[in-house]
Amino acid sequence: MLIATILRGFHSSTRPCTLAAIVATAASSPLSFPSASHAQQPYSDPRLAPLIPAGGGAKTVAPAAIPGSPRIATTPSPAPARAYAQAQPPATPPAPAAAPSPAAPATPSPAEPGVPGTAVGWERYGASVFVCGHSFHVFIDKKLRALAYEAGFQQHRHAGRLFVGGSHPIEIWNLPDSQNTARAALREGHVDILTLSPHMFLPDRGIDFYADYAWKYNPHVRVMLQLSWPTNPASAGVDWNQMALILKGYMALADAQVKAINARHKADFVSTVPVVLAVMKLREEIIAGRVPGIRAFGDLFTDKLGHAGPALENLVTFCWYAAIYKRSPEGLKALDAPATQVKAETNAALQKIAWAVISPTLPAAPAKPTAATSPTPMAAHR
């Protein structure tokens, strides 16, 4: 189905750009690629087709081509990455742990640890998370640990972080082994969650390569993609009705690539975390005066490019906590001042927004923490 069909509801500049309108359009007009060769499918919206070459991936375009678009770098050739993946020795994934007895105690003991690299371990006791991506994303690691510990996921651990500013997943994948700490961590078989942060230009072959590689070493892995807000988001020149066109296409293309990867592996292990929808919802709430402590949308950012300030960092982290642990972040205090520069009443509004956006994307059964605990100071995670 054409992207133009999906986005038809946003062509009028007089139509309000609201989260509800975007979600309604998405629900009524799904997008899918017809075959496993999804990485070769051209972008089908005639207005945006020049931005995606027939071979897939991003190419260099003028910054004005899309309002608020992120920095676009020429995508490296996929040949070295594919050759690397094919040359790797066969994996020996860790054996799945036996399911715990219904009578087993809820709180792990030294004799019954959670087992990294197994669904039994991370879903019950806490995930081993490797954070990989650009500057609109990688700040989540320490804050996510603080939330997980407070909620009782005591074996949540930081498996590593790989930061490349302004990067696409394919650019990070193509880093040599001496720099690619994400691949090294995945080979150990104990990464439960790999996070990636693609730009708007999709499909990105790096997502396929990382997903295939992670699955090869851990059949219980989850690969989760952050769909981020655009750059220059608070610029006076941004038309948010037109921006909705771009963001909807971004989400539709990401969804199509996720579905294709999951179909290839016959498992739903790749998913998206639509942070961009939370940012749009927060913008609506700020304009309506319903977010204590935040007067203007521009107050969320530390610079014109759109790097997150403390409140936006917290919102993004709340979204990730909800997406990983399938629980509302509402009521958690670990990121309240003085742990961060955000007051409790502001965080309460951010938590509500995060859960409203993420909860409809979750499967039915929520994860259960081992036990409730008091908040862990952020200083302990630095």
Image (cartoon, grey):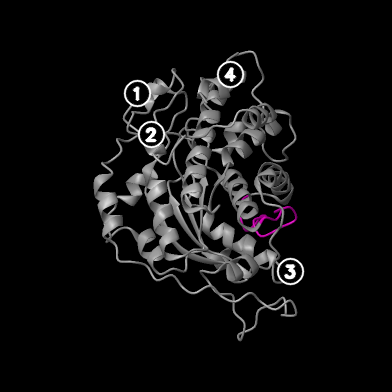
| Residue sitting at x 49%, y 63% | 219
Quadrant of residue 189 within the rendered picture:
bottom left
- Mark 3 residue element: loop
Question: Does 325 appear in magenta?
Answer: no
What's the magenta region? 326-341
Q: CA distance from mark 1 to mark 2?
A: 10 Å
Q: Residues within 10 Å of mark 2 (few under 14, many from 20)?
A: some
* Gap in angstroms between the C-alphas marked 4 and 2: 26 Å
Secondary element at image label 2: loop
Residues under numbered marks 3 and 2 in contact, where contact means CB atoms less than 8 Å apart: no
In this image, 39 relative to 371: left or right?
left
Badge 1 amino acid: Ala
Q: For mark 3, what is the residue?
A: 372
Disc 3 marks a residue whose amino acid type is Ala
* Label disc, if present, on residue 8 of the rendered structure: 4
- The earlier-in-sequence mark between 4 and 3 is 4
Relative placement, left or right, of 47 versus 295 is: left
Rendered image: mark on residue 370 = none
The numbered mark at residue 71 is: 2
Q: Position of residue 227 (x, y in %)?
A: 52, 41
Q: Which residue is mark 1?
A: 62
Quarter occupied by residue 113: bottom right
Query: Given the image, on which type of amino acid does mark 2 rest?
Result: Arg
Dot 4 surroundings within 10 Å: few (below 14), some, or many (20 or more)? few
